């Protein structure tokens, strides 16, 4: 659910290496050429160094972005205030995509963590979030909470053996989210226990105000799960990230335009995942539905 109560002062209001053997003069065609072997080794070591550099760059980007997001969270209220329209543009199409780019940069590291490590780190960050909130370090707690839920999404992916199961979940969560926000538990929590929703959401502070737009933790979890599914099942990772990240901005804009306290975010999130990968998902489902080729009859050797 995207909640934008802080923006509802009215529209406009302020408020990998492969070696090749060459047959050269002086060498037999079936023998390995030393220069080729040396070149292959150089290529492999060069690629390893390149991959190491890419890994270091990703880690540096992740740390820099985390620090920048936490700093914005801490100082947002001291920045110049802007109109509601600019708040929506900044939050929905700058701050929220920047936050979820953490998952895009970190995605290659997912394979380095075993299932139990993912769960252990996620639970450890959840405990850290609680302690940080008790200590009043809300800007840092907001980031640790986001990472903890994202890691849980990656951990849950192990239970999805086929892309068809991911598709099924993407379809089912849409009506469930709509009902929950309109008449179910989410509506009750937002209206009757807003402090609970504060604890179960990620805050995106508004420029120049001591207030924020909020995104429910299930929205973060399913974003993480769908993004990791694109890598696991050979779907389109970057276009999917773009579509899903922008879906939150669109939902936020619709929330403000409709002048309501919140709208379900999972319908557009699921639509972004499915529509971008519809042809690939369909091909995967068709291949799975095709019968295995018949086993040739056994013929004894003469």
Image: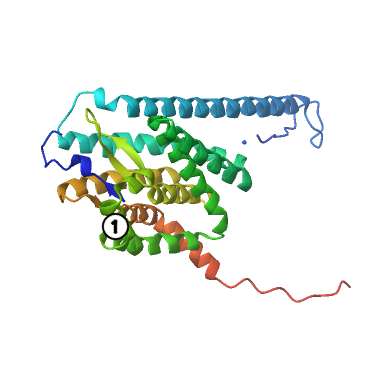
**Does the image show residue 225?**
yes
**Who's the residue at 39% across and 53% down the image?**
273
**Who's the residue at 38% across and 29% down the image?**
69
Residue 183 appears left or right of 201: left
Relative to 236, residue 144 above or below? above
Q: Quadrant of residue 100?
A: top left
Relative to 58, residue 253 above or below? below
Residue 272 appears left or right of 36: left
Q: Residue 78, how many percent across, how many down?
A: 25, 23
Relative to 87, residue 158 above or below? below
Quarter containing the C terminus: bottom right
**Does the image show residue 231?**
no
Element on which disc 1 rests? helix
Give the labeled residue for mark 1. Answer: 188
Residue 281 appears left or right of 191: right
Q: Nearer the viewer, residue 226 or 302?
A: 226
Q: Residue 86, how many percent across, how many down?
A: 18, 34
Residue at the right extreme, as displayed: 302
Say few, some or many: other residues with alpha carbon within 10 Å of mark 1 (under 14 / 14 to 19 / 20 or more): some
Q: Quadrant of residue 17?
A: top right
Q: Residue 55, how many percent across, how many down?
A: 56, 29
């Amino acid at each position: 659910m995207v909640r934008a109560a802080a923006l509802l002062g009215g529209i406009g209001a302020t408020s990998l290496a492969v070696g090749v053997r060459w047959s050269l003069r002086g060498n037999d065609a079936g023998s390995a050429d030393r220069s080729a072997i040396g070149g292959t080794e150089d290529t492999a070591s060069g690629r390893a160094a390149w991959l190491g550099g890419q890994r270091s760059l990703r880690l540096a980007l992740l740390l820099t972005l985390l620090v920048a997001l936490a700093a914005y969270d801490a100082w947002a209220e001291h920045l110049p205030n802007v109109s509601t329209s600019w708040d929506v543009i900044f939050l929905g199409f700058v701050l929220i995509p920047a936050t979820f780019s953490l998952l895009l940069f970190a995605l290659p590291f997912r394979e380095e963590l075993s299932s139990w490590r993912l769960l252990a780190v996620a639970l450890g960050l959840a405990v850290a979030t609680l302690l940080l909130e008790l200590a009043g370090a809300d800007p840092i707690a907001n980031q640790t909470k986001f990472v903890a839920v994202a890691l849980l999404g990656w951990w849950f992916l192990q239970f999805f053996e086929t892309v068809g199961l991911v598709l099924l979940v993407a379809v089912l969560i849409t009506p469930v989210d709509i009902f929950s926000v309109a008449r179910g538990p989410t509506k009750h929590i937002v209206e009757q226990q807003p402090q609970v929703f504060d604890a179960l959401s990620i805050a995106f502070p508004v420029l120049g105000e001591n207030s924020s737009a909020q995104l429910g933790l299930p929205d973060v979890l399913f974003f993480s799960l769908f993004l990791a599914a694109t890598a696991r099942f050979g779907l389109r990772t970057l276009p999917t990230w773009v579509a899903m990240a922008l879906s939150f901005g669109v939902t936020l804009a619709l929330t403000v335009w409709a002048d309501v306290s919140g709208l379900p975010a999972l319908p557009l999130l699921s639509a972004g995942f499915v529509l971008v990968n519809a042809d690939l998902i369909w091909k995967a489902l068709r291949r799975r539905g095709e019968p295995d080729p018949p086993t040739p009859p056994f013929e004894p050797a003469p």
